[in-house]
Image (cartoon, rainbow, N blue to C red):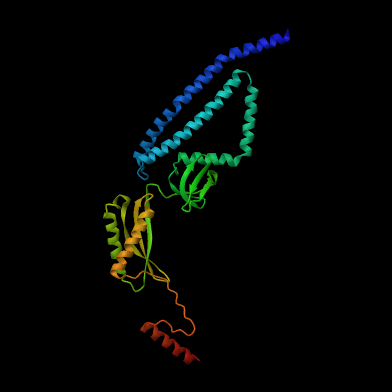
Amino acid sequence: MVDEFSIHQLESAVLSAAVPIILIVIAALVALRFARPLIRKVLRRVLQSQALATSTERQTAADILKRADTLETFGTSVIRFVVGVLVVALVLAVLQLGWVVGALGFVFAALAFAGQDFVRDYLAGIFILVENQFYVGDVIQVSGITGRVEDFTLRRTTLRDLHGTLHIVSNGQIRIASNHTRVYAGINLDVPIAYDANVELALTLIREVGEALAADQAWADRILEPPVAVRVNEFGDIGMFIKVLGRVRAGDQWVVTGELRRRIVAAFATAGISMALRRIVVHRDGEEAEPRTPAAAEWSAGHTRTKERRG
């Protein structure tokens, strides 16, 4: 009799809870169905308004689209997780199994305490997304590693450097992120010339080369400010160094700097300006030394006579 009553009571509980559970599941499916389009629409409006209002970091339409897609995927994943947790909690509450919810809460708290590094990685990934520090396709430097971002998740960032090596960096380990492909980049070049070179002519040639490069149709779209020689920056062991500065679009600094070097070398060769070169002279026993300049020979003779008087 007791068994029959218990079975009947259980069946009644399940039947009475069936309708609420079905409604909960339907509500969850509807929320998931319309969540992604809603997130996409809101994100693109917000990001476009930010791009128009921000003067220090203007982004192209492609940049806005990439950021919107990344945030859309992240937002959809978060909503799926939240909806799933709510569905489980509500179903357990309908079935009057609240103690299971409490037990699961203790389990999640224990896991969060034990996996602090894991949680820190995810939190750092969230801030990277929200603050738009970088996204897939950018060239960045993190944790002493420079490379192109091939993949990004909330837990880790995947970079590939120029050697083809794939680096996987936990987001929690990222303290400083340097982005080489955001808005614009600079040309920072030191051009070495010999001490006996015509400095004024070298400065003029570098300025003319920079202007010609900026006027070239093949390079004009990449250059924001033509490269110019701003000063004689340093006296070194092998010669002087002329500092050349300019501004280009982000991501084009390497190819533009390479083309600038090529043109400067060609212009110097045509004008007869010597580049600073390190030379090593080796004398072997029994071989005549390399002929010296008159000034060097005179200095050597005077130095020898001084040594003889001291002796």
Residue 126, image x and y in percent?
50, 38
Q: Residue furthest top?
A: 1
Q: Residue furthest front?
A: 286
Q: Nearer the viewer, residue 44 or 283?
A: 283
Q: Which residue is depicted at the point 43% across and 30% down?
A: 39
92 on left or right of 174: right
Name the image quarter holding the N terminus. top right
Q: Which residue is depicted at the point 55% across and 14% down?
A: 19
Q: Nearer the viewer, residue 63 or 236?
A: 63
Residue 86, image x and y in percent?
55, 25
Residue 270, image x and y in percent?
28, 68
Task: Establish if 296 lies above or below 128.
Answer: below
Q: Which residue is depicted at the point 47% across and 22% down?
A: 30
1 on left or right of 50: right
Q: Which residue is depicted at the point 56% across and 18% down?
A: 21
Task: Establish if 135 lies above or below 272.
Answer: above
Task: Establish if 283 lies above or below 190.
Answer: below
Quadrant of res 59: top left
Q: Residue furthest right?
A: 1
Task: Establish if 226 lies above or below 280.
Answer: above
Residue 46, image x and y in percent?
39, 34
Q: Nearer the viewer, residue 96 or 63?
A: 63
Number of marks in picture:
0
Quadrant of res 188: bottom left
99 on left or right of 47: right
